[in-house]
Amino acid sequence: MKIGNIDFGSRPLFLAPMEDVTDIGFRKLCKRYGAAMVYTEFVSADAIIRSIPSTLSKMKVDDDERPVGIQIYGRDVDSMVEAAKIVETFHPDIIDLNFGCPVKKVAGKGAGAGLLKDVPLMLEITREVVKAVHTPVTAKTRLGWDKENLIITTLAEQLQDCGIQALTIHGRTRSQMYTGEADWTLIGEVKKNPRIHIPIIGNGDITSPEKAEEAFDEYGVDAVMIGRATFGRPWFFKECRDFMNDKAHKEGADSVPAAPLTIDDKIDILEEQLRINVERIDEYRGILHTRRHLAASPIFKNIPNFRQTRIAMLRANTVDEVVKILEDCRLKLKQL
């Protein structure tokens, strides 16, 4: 599977762009454990143009996390074009256009998934951004605004005709937000369309390695993008890759089954994530960046009465406090 000149190999797994989640430390860990491509946190075109320091810092990428995409959102042609030109100076491998974010502060202002209600504007933005930059342009969107307006099969062709080099589809409407289940059937319909020649990347409810494999087998997508399942679990990509490789090995493929990560490995990874964030920013903000991952990590769910430990994690203000809690969890998990 290729986007532009980047060859991702067979059945690649991508890390979704997520605000306050996909900072550089987390991206590097996801890359190490099997993400074929990672994305920065999505950023506002207006904030890029106004050179807001916090926004510009989100777009800094390191060579050891490549290939990396920067995703932008906005609601008018001029700002999106100007922002894309600025983004290009940060040298991402891909510029992704966010036409899928459903949250009110984005979609309610006509950006993100809000553009599903103004497809002509979405297409004009796409055409003009593609013309304005040399970096491959991709897009991410949803099935439609609501269940009465499932427009993705037509929209995919229209976006392709505007010059995008790949399309990511989240299997929900905007009105669903993140409720209910992702519907992959229309994603599969887009992929089956003989007019579609760009890669189709599926997204939504990939919560297990089995789900990742099903997305490839049942719906034929070229890549799978994974979001919320990675919270507190940057090794999820390895789990998915190992599962698919092990199954292929059992079916006769020339691949060697990989050893699963141990509890010690996983606690070490979370502690490393904490250290990366603290060294990159400072102790207080580094801990804030790491907390949501720690609190959401599924490895702790078997610890009895974990609720109190989780509260302590969210209240910890020093690295020593957080590490002590993680070490206590390590001991408890090894005793289970």
Image (tube, rainbow, N blue to C red):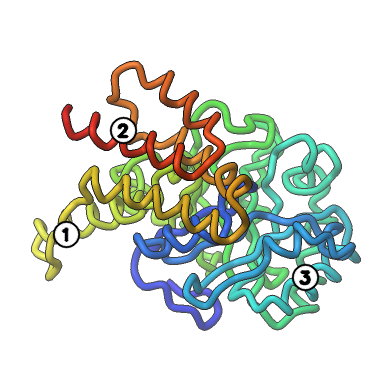
**If the image is split into quadrants, where does the N terminus sit?**
bottom left
For label 3, the residue is 84
The picture places residue 280, in percent across and down from the top left corner, at: 58, 61
The picture places residue 266, in percent across and down from the top left corner, at: 30, 47
Query: In the image, which disc is placed on residue 258?
Result: 1
Tag in front: 1 or 2: 2
Towards the viewer: 194 or 186 = 186
Q: Is residue 61 above or below residue 248?
A: below
| Type of amino acid at the residue the image marks with label 2 | Asp
At horizontal 37% and vertical 64% (from top left) the residue drawn is 32
At horizontal 34% and vertical 43% (from top left) the residue drawn is 211
Query: In the image, which disc is placed on residue 104?
Result: none
* Circle 1 SS class: loop
| Type of amino acid at the residue the image marks with label 3 | Ala
The picture places residue 207, in percent across and down from the top left corner, at: 39, 39
* Circle 3 SS class: helix
Q: Is residue 66 left or right of residue 173?
A: left
For label 2, the residue is 328
Tag in front: 3 or 2: 2
Asked if residue 124 shows in the view, the reply is no
